[in-house]
Amino acid sequence: MTTLTTARTTPGERIVPGAERTLRNRVTLGQAVSDTLAMARRGLIKIRRTPEQLIDVTVQPIIFTLMFTYIFGGAISGSVAAYLPVIIPGILVQTVITTSAVTGTQLREDMDKGVFDRFRSLPIARIAPLAGALVADTVRYLIATTLTIGMGLLMGWRPGGGVGGVLLAALLVVVCAWSLSWIFAFLGVIARNAGSVQGISFLVLFPLTFLSNAFVPVDTMPGWLQGFVDTNPVSHLVTAVRDLAGTGTVSGQVGVALLSCGAVVAVFAPLAVRSYMKKA
């Protein structure tokens, strides 16, 4: 014969039914980091099994570099060789920050498919699936950066900043792309479907990249447009990359770019995490 026992309560205390109890998943910081890295590894496995996901970071840098260089090089700078120091940093910034929009689209697709619902049943940190996706996407940024720089070198680009300047420029672009991915992660959480995330991302990134100094000198634009271009954060990032790669100079534009990245993360990381936690 067995005996059932119940937890005793103090006199007058109401026993809370199980249906009304809120279960909290409490994990340590070390476990949260470990779970995040595990989710990042999952993202990398997905890329390995479906390599077509990398079309935007493998084909786009090559096509854009060739197209913009040979179409606009002679008209803007007089020759392809003279245009390469202008266009390669511009293409680098444009390609990598555009890639950051994929974070929100894939996040929304996983949530729509119920993948994140299955993650909720696992004994892992609730923030790990979101943070892991952002960590895994840094590989995409590194691929796009490497291909763009490599394409420029094959076409004759010779950065005056040397290896050190180019590496710092690449690191700056990757950091900025990662910070922007928090914006699209937030959109991915609150949007209704992946298509809307992609559409909003295009509306945001298209004017920011093309209405900048990435492809043409600012002084060739109308006066009313130059004011917007000069304040456009993409223009500051492109200028910083040109300074680092072209001369190896850590100019004030580098500081402006990093401050802008910090501001984006400070605003959108809490918004993305809070929205995600409500859904998770």
Image: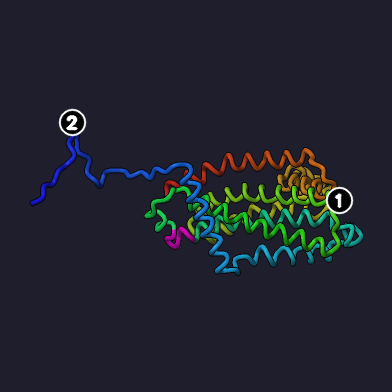
Say whether residue 79 is left or right of residue 226.
Answer: right
Look at the numbered disc 1 and give the secondary structure of its residue.
Answer: loop
- Residue 153 at what x, y percent from top left? 82, 61
Extreme residue toward the right, this view: 78
- Residue 55 at what x, y percent from top left? 64, 67
- Residue 247 at what x, y percent from top left? 85, 46
Which residue does the numbered mark 1 point to in the structure image? 160
Say whether residue 48 is left or right of residue 144.
Answer: left
Instruction: Identify the magenta region.
Output: 110-115
Q: Nearer the viewer, residue 269 or 202?
A: 269
Extreme residue toward the left, this view: 1
**Does residue 274 appear in the picture of this structure?**
yes
* Residue 88 position by quadrant: bottom right
Q: Which of marks 2 and 1 is nearer the N terminus?
A: 2
- For the residues labelled 2 and 1, say whether their Cβ atoms are less than 8 Å apart: no
Q: How is the image coloured?
A: rainbow
Residue drawn at (79%, 41%) of the image: 250
The disc labelled 1 sits on which kind of residue? Gly
**Does residue 190 appear in the picture of this structure?**
no
Magenta residues, dominant SS class: helix
* Residue 145 position by quadrant: bottom right
Which residue does the numbered mark 2 point to in the structure image? 10
Cα gap from disc 2 to disc 1, whole angstroms: 77 Å
Say whether residue 83 is left or right of residue 260.
Answer: right
